[in-house]
Image (cartoon, rainbow, N blue to C red):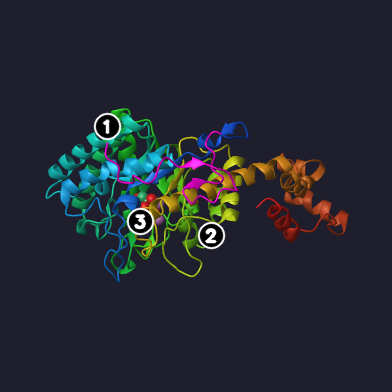
Amino acid sequence: MSSHFPSISRIAYEGPKSKNPLAFKHYNPDEVVEGKTMRDHLRFSIVYWHTMCGQGGDMFGAPTAIRPWDAGKSGIELAKARVPVFFEIAEKLGMPYYAFHDRDVAPHGQTLRESNEYLDTIVALLKEQQQRTGIKLLWGTAQLFVHPRFMHGAATSPSSEVFAFSAAQVKKALEVTHELGGEGYTFWGGREGYMTLWNTDMKRELDHLAKFLHMAVDYAKQIGFKGQFYIEPKPKEPTKHQYDSDAAACLNFLREYDLLPYFKLNLETNHATLAGHSMQHEMEVAGAAGALGSLDANTGDLLLGWDTDQFLTDASTATQMMLTTLKYGGLTTGGVNFDAKVRRESVDPEDLFYSHIGGMDTFARGLKNAAAIRADGRLGDFVKQRYSTWDTGLGASIEAGKESFSSLEAFALEKGEATQVPSGRQEFLENLVNEFI
Ligand code: XLS
Ligand code: NI
Ligand code: NI
């Protein structure tokens, strides 16, 4: 097999003292943390769309990173040429998983039939590479936002014809995800939202979206696909209001339409911050509902208000994310999926390696820090102690449903004033967490 990166070999773990930019300083796949290897905790995944299709174009400028393997090719020939390059990168990074959209691995055809044929051609190549490398598919998804027909949405389009085209595309995407042994299938809203309410019947659109997702669940059953379904919340971009705006909105929608048994959330760090939340918040919301599924691991820029999809290099955020992950029992079907891209100015192919190495090391540090905080126990004990008035006496009685407004009024009248209202100790806890970062 010819190599596109002859000077880069398999990235090895060299430990925190290494100065080798093409080595892991913290991600040591076989190292055991809380009884499981780092590989199994983190379940890293590389995405096809940013890695192979991202060329640094933006709305003000042309692509900056013209890849040597792309040169002179287009259409299905280009799509074919990218597959082995992608797997070489994934293999050299030691990625156990990958994720893709149907229309980023294979081009749009003139008709649905032609698009499906293109996809089948590429899926055969993906399958070969999966068998050769042992790399598995974390999740598949359908790209329902680039083609002009999706300008008003896909499942929420006012056109029933567009709904039908979307259904046909997801049907095929589910089939190929199943064929490739995908462990999940993701719905990110794409253009499911609105630009103005003056032209929008919101209730009707949400009903249609729910109907669409039920059809997907039914079809998965029909073909025997057992992978986990995910919804990926995002509040804005491309539409003014995306229906799946944040974890709470998604959970509410899933509950309202009896979809919660079939879906978990795929949470993305940059989407959380666009929604005005921290990623820790989004993960706690999902975790508390038993719906913490998978993580799209990236970050935004504090000073920019859109989805910059940068690689996360902040160990503090990674520590928060891994603490919540461990708290809710770890990632089972999901993974740490690098939905992230190199900057427009990072034009060299080797930047694809530095970026992923940095992201993987950051999450490995986060995992080790989180495990150390849990082993130390002070943070957990503090939170437990903070709620201790609920463990016995009055609190236990309220939790057990034995009290009422009248009995509580009687308690308060008798007590005079609440005396057990201790300090929140925020700064003390921030210092404590910082000991580990
Ligand atoms: C876009 C989303 C998208 C999904 C997959 O902002 O993050 O890339 O992860 O459709
Ligand atoms: Ni994403
Ligand atoms: Ni995103």
Amino acid on which disc 2 is placed: His
Which residue is tagged 2?
277
Q: Main secondary structure of the magenta part?
A: loop
Which residue is tagged 3?
203
Determine the CA span between mark 2 and mark 1: 41 Å
Label 3's element?
Answer: helix
Q: Assess disc 3: are there few (<14), some (14-19) or many (≥20) residues with their C-alpha within 10 Å of its C-alpha.
A: few
Q: Residue furthest front?
A: 7
Q: Is residue 243 magenta?
A: no
Q: Are marks 2 and 3 in contact (CB under 8 Å)?
A: no
Q: Is residue 15 magenta?
A: yes
Q: Are marks 2 and 1 in contact (CB under 8 Å)?
A: no
Residue 258 location (% of width, % of height): 42, 41
Label 1's element?
Answer: helix
Residue 17 location (% of width, % of height): 60, 48
Point out the image quarter for the N terminus: top left
262 sits left or right of 113 in the view:
right
- Toward which corner of the image does residue 305 lie, by quadrant? bottom left
Res 90 label: none
Res 128 label: 1
